[in-house]
Amino acid sequence: MAYSDKVVDHYEHPRNVGTLDKSSDEVGTGLVGAPECGDVMRLQIRVNPETQVIEDAKFKTFGCGSAIASSSLATEWVKGKTVAEALAISNTDIVKELALPPVKIHCSVLAEDAIRAAIGDWKKKNNVAEGAEATATAAAH
Amino acid sequence: MSANSLGVDMIVAQSKTPLPEGVHLPLYMDNHATTAMDPRVLEAMMPYFSGKFGNAASRNHAFGWEAEAAVETAREQIAKLIGATAKEIIFTSGATESNNLAIKGVAEMYRERGNHIITQVTEHKAVLDTCKRLEKLGYEITYLPVQADGLISLDDLKAAFTDKTILVSIMFANNEIGVIQPVAEIGKLCHEKGVIFHTDAVQAVGKIPVNVQAMNIDLLSLSGHKIYGPKGAGGLYVRRRNPRVQLTEQINGGGHERGMRSGTLNVPGIVGLGKACEIAGEEMEVESKRLTELRDYMKAKFENALDYVHVNGNMEHHLPGNLNMSFVYVEGESLLMGINDIAVSSGSACTSATLEPSYVLKALGLGDDVAHSSIRFGLGRFNTKAEVDYVADKLITTVSKLRELSPLYEMVKEGIDLSKIEWAAH
């Protein structure tokens, strides 16, 4: 299978590999996938409590090149966005950016799930209601 | 956006750093998938593509006689390698066809006697899919399980026989994990029960001793392109005495190969197959020793440099050049990407068109995550120690790098039991 240049780039030079402190209230952790499926992504975000801007993001992934690239790209994209803006990221954006073939689309879906899971975790920790950023989402679109 | 082609030319062009002596990129270490043709085989074949182009079935002129003589020589060469007589060798387009002919040929011929066939779960698809087809036609198939080391249990086999059993088909050596089944014991058992025994010996012939007499084998499939011969040329050994095995032909049209396989013979391919067998027989002892040492050396390198590595398949009854290892917590396709100038294969689902992990590894009882992190190395005649060092070093570096990216490895190192986690699978 031929990989796109961008997938190869993320594989050779992954962005934001690492770990944030799970116990901090500013950190949301999303762990998605399963070892049996051959894909596990952990995406973490550190959110500024006042501005709801994602100031840092880190990932670790067990999976193929496309999975690694998808999650690496996800951390790049969420950094600097507000939580609401990050929720607007869809897997089709990732597919387009990385030129993923049909058989690898599920990797992008998992990356989107990872973003949502991380945000969901942060919200739970900070008692942020669902929909609290609804207006911001509308604006982002 | 251009596609980063993994074509051979591209890889050669990209190689900038000076390589150790004896290492040429891209590096081929996937000899269970296919093998490079030995130059001596190619040399033997060439005349039959040009001047000696006769049809081996042309009985009335020198062109035909010349081709026929070459074919008969090949028959002798193959027979010698497996302890058979030349008359017992018939030529096919490859082992897939040989397997189809053996299994369907027996099933149809002996239908009056019974409709039960015994095989096992780690067979090549050529056997498994043929059996599935027969099931649709009303045959009963028993698929024996394998133990964690890949071997079948002889007790399971004994218990599986019924009075309707007409065939046992069990491969000699497995193409993924290199495990060698107890063929002689299986043959003896089948002989006692009066049941025909077929073995797909594609990965064994020419690499380890195979003797159809001593091992009570009645039918045997072999293939040229696994033993440094050409693709498109295979053989089927069909026993003529004690007992005489008969097959219903699967291809009609002229009655070639004693009525068992019609069609003009692929003379150059057959010449190549014969020559490959001759060379393999002569060099087997030295080559198998060399490959076993290289393989064990590579295995030791991995085990010394990395933790959480796991060898798949019984290592005592094992093909010389084969090594199937799982590098746990690192996924197979991402591993292959990091060593993309080296040709090996993986049991990971991501590397298969169907996204299913290797059924052979699953049959061993391995968890999917271990199957996903497996790599199959197939050392062969043309691999050198320098190449083994290059591959091992590069793989160790890549595994280490990917483990830094692996959330599973981090969790395991922290002492977390992964089996206790509830995964949010999609």
Image (cartoon, rainbow, N blue to C red):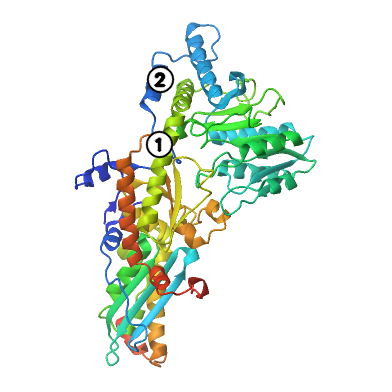
Q: Which marked residue is nearer to the observer: mark 2 or mark 1? A: 1
Q: Vertically, is A105 above or below B325?
A: below
The x, y position of residue A17, in whole percent, is 30, 71
Q: Residue at x 52, y 21 (%)?
A: B265
What number of labels is visible?
Answer: 2
Query: Where residue A66 appears, x then y in whole percent?
Result: 36, 61
User: Could you give the CA–CA distance between mark 2 and mark 1, rounded to whole angstroms?
Assistant: 26 Å
Residue at label 2?
Answer: B44
At label 1, counting other C-alpha atoms closer than 10 Å, the crowd grade (few under 14, some 14-19, many 20 or more) is some
Subunit bearing disc 2: B
- Taking depth in this image into account, of B29 and B10 the one nearest to the observer is B29
Q: Residue furthest top?
A: B61
Can residue A31 be seen? yes
**Kind of residue sitting beneath label 1:** Arg
Please report, as a chain letter, where disc 1 is located: B
Whether residue A138 is visible to the viewer of this picture, yes or no, is: no
Of residues B92 and B149, the one nearer the viewer is B149
Residue for badge 1: B290
- Residue A48 is left or right of residue B126, and the answer is left
Instruction: Find numbered disc 2 in the image and state the secondary structure of the residue it sits on.
Output: helix
Q: Residues within 10 Å of mark 2 (few under 14, many from 20)?
A: some
